[in-house]
Image (spheres, rainbow, N blue to C red):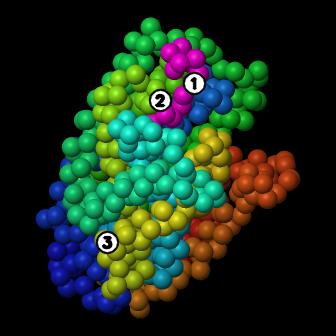
Amino acid sequence: MSLEHLVSHLDTDMDLSNADIAPVPSAQRNWKAISFFTLWVGMAVNIPSYMIAASLIDGGMSWQQAMWTVLLGNLIVFIPMSLSGHAGTKYGIPFPVFARASFGVRGSHIPSLLRAIVACGWFGIQTWIGGAAIYTIVLIIWPVIADGPAMMPEWVGVSLIQFICFMLFWAMNIWLIWKGINSIRILEHVAAPFLLLCGLALLAWAYQGANGFGPMLQAGSKFENSSEFWNLFWPSLTAMVGFWATLTLNISDFTRYASSQRAQVVGQLSGLPSTMTLFAFIGVAVTSATIIIFGEAIWDPVVLVRRFESHTLVFFSMIAVIIATISTNAAANVVGPANAFSNMMPSKIDFKRGGYITGIIGILIMPWKLIADPSGYIFTWLIGYSALLGPVIGIILVDYFLIRKTELNVEDLYRSKGIYAGVNPVAIIALVIGVLPNIPGFLANVGLYSGSGFVVDLYNYAWFIGLGISSLVYYVLMRNRV
């Protein structure tokens, strides 16, 4: 039976499908490799990508060690990324529907919501960064507001003007959601070459201003012994994997539009590791150059460009930050949660309404507090959610490739009484067992547990441990059930 026939003749329950999560017909699956390449350029060129590499240098790594950590982490995450994208390309289905095969039609709400809540956090972080860029532009035009009263409760942590700028950028994202997913693809195509040029321009400025890259190419690591390096390397590698662990789950939200498996694999391989490593190098190089130029390491590019003497240069730099941030936010942090919320109540929540819910949660989490501390950004935020998402992707991939041999009954994915009905208890058991070993380490990092030793150190490998344990448990319990 053709995919087009399925789309028009699916014998589905009304509360399990709508136009946004139904299979994409072959005629509408026209994304080539260049589409996925530009998608990843648009997503990878962002301020957190820049900041995370610079934070590795701050932690004691040499620039070579930092670059290899970034590259290795992104090569590792590409593997489950391309595998997870296979189902989207083959069947034209989004992630929440794909998750129904392993977790059950109703059980799929669990991985979908885990993915959605993390994306809401990222949406808030990126929106705060975009708002900070707008705030910088406002300071150029009206500098006296920097000394004005906060006019906000102290517990909020930001001034009224900062919050207004945050909400202005938030409204820009909401407008893009209202325009629909095709507008996101167009944005990525337009933004990708511009963002690469801006990154290289910033690198050229640093090179010229510091008369070379200065201490970056000269200074080695600050570790006194190898054990100190490994103590930072493993959690940092986990954080690098965790950085895109969200997209390993819902990449099928995009690959469902791919023209072929080759298009999604080649496009992602050429776009993800290369762009992340290049932009990480820019972050490390520019941060190192700021030591010579300004006498201190400035790892936040928004703060850095405020130090430029030319107001015109600051203005256009902030425009670049705004474009980079909105291109990342739209693709990485809207599509996934929008489809996840739609999956909960397809008859009442479509893609746009799901996107609006994402935006509201992105405000409530107060994202400016999530990235206030670089160590908290890596050890609490990135590693913390990777401990949840690693087990999920392990379960889904084992189910799809090893249990079902990539064969899915698309009609039953949209039926409440089909072969994927209800909740698959095996998936829930495997998920819980995969998460448990990482709980002591997480509690220790947020200050709720004072213990130490092996059970806490496991947290440094959270994504890998969770994926490995859940994959094994799921395979053992499911291999004779299908």
Residue 248 sits above or below residue 426 on the image = above
State the image coordinates of residue 245 (x, y, percent, origin top left): 50, 53
Residue hosting label 2: 304
Relative to the observer, which residue lies in front, 325 or 241? Answer: 325
Which class describes the residues within 10 Å of circle 2: few (<14), some (14-19), or many (20+)? some
- Magenta stretch: includes residue 148: no
Res. 311 mark = none
Q: Which residue is mark 3?
A: 351
The answer to whether 482 appears left or right of 325 in the picture is: right
Q: Secondary structure at mark 1?
A: loop
Between label 2 and label 3, give the one nearer the viewer. 2
* Amino acid marked by disc 3: Phe
Task: Give the SS element for disc 3.
Answer: helix
Q: Residue at x 69, y 21 (%)?
A: 222
Residue shown at 61%/40% (left/top)?
374
Q: CA distance from mark 2 to mark 3?
A: 37 Å
* The one of 373 and 100 positioned closer to us in this rendering: 373
Identified at 33% across, 90% down, the residue is: 13
Question: What residue is shown with label 1?
Answer: 297
Whichever of labels 1 and 2 marks the residue nearer the N terminus, that label is 1
Residue 398 appearing in the image: no
Q: Is residue 296 magenta?
A: yes
Label 2 sits on what residue type?
A: Leu
The reply to whether discs 1 and 3 touch (Cβ–Cβ < 8 Å) is no
- Stretch in magenta: 290-304
**In the figure, 477 relative to 46: above or below?**
below
| Magenta part, dominant SS | helix
Q: Earlier in the sequence, mark 2 or mark 3?
A: 2
